[in-house]
Image: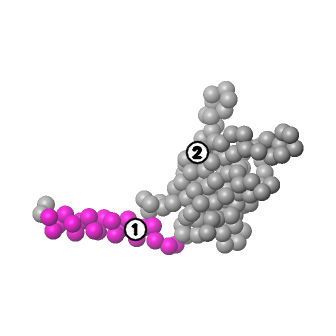
Amino acid sequence: MNRKTFFLAMALLVGGGQALAQPGANQKWIGVWHAEVNVQRPDTLTLAADSGRLGGTIVLDMISGEGGVPQVIERDPHVLLNPHLDGNTLWFQIQMRMRDGKAVMHTFTATLISPGKADIECLNCGADAPVVEMAKDR
C-alpha cells in the first residue's frame, strides 16, 4: 500500500469511527453521572462511545451510617456489560463477586427523568434496593 492510500484509509477509518459516535441516542447519556445522597456523591456512572458503541463503568459506594454521619466505607468498580438503550432507558449488567467468592450478575436500568437527570435501579438486588437519582456533570 502506498503512502497516499495508507493515509486515505486511515482518514476513512477515523472519520467512520467518529461518525458512529456522533450525536444521536447515545449523546444524552455520554458523560459522568453522580448520585447525591446526604450531600455526598456516591456512585459514579461514566459513559462513552469511543468505539462507536455505548460503554462505560460504574463505581458503587457502600455507605455506613455508623456514628450518625453517613460515610463511604468501600468503593466497588465495575465494567458495564451488555449496555443498550431502549427509548429513554439505559440497560446494563455488572458482575459482582460476593464475599463467598461467587460471581453474581446484576441488571440495572437508568431512566432519564429530565435532561441531565436519571433514576438508576438494580432490578435483581433485592426488595430493599433503592432507586437513586443521578445527575450528569456539566
Q: Which residue is mark 2?
A: 78
Sequence-first tag of 1 and 2: 1
Mark 1, residue position: 18
Query: What is the residue that sits farthest to the left in this orientation?
Result: 2
Magenta stretch in the rendered image? 3-24
Q: Residue 39: where, in percent of width, then height? A: 77, 57
Residue 82, above or below 22: above
Can see residue 102?
yes
Q: Amino acid at mark 2?
A: His
- Main secondary structure type of the part rendered in magenta: helix
The image quadrant where one finds the N terminus is bottom left
Badge 1: few (under 14), some or many (20 or more) residues near its Cα, within 10 Å? some
Find out whether the residues at labels 1 and 2 contact each other: C-beta distance under 8 Å. no
Magenta residue check for 15: yes
Q: Residue at x 61, y 50 (%)?
A: 58
Q: Quadrant of residue 65?
A: top right
Residue at (80%, 46%) from the top-left corner? Answer: 70
Q: Is residue 74 left or right of residue 26?
A: right
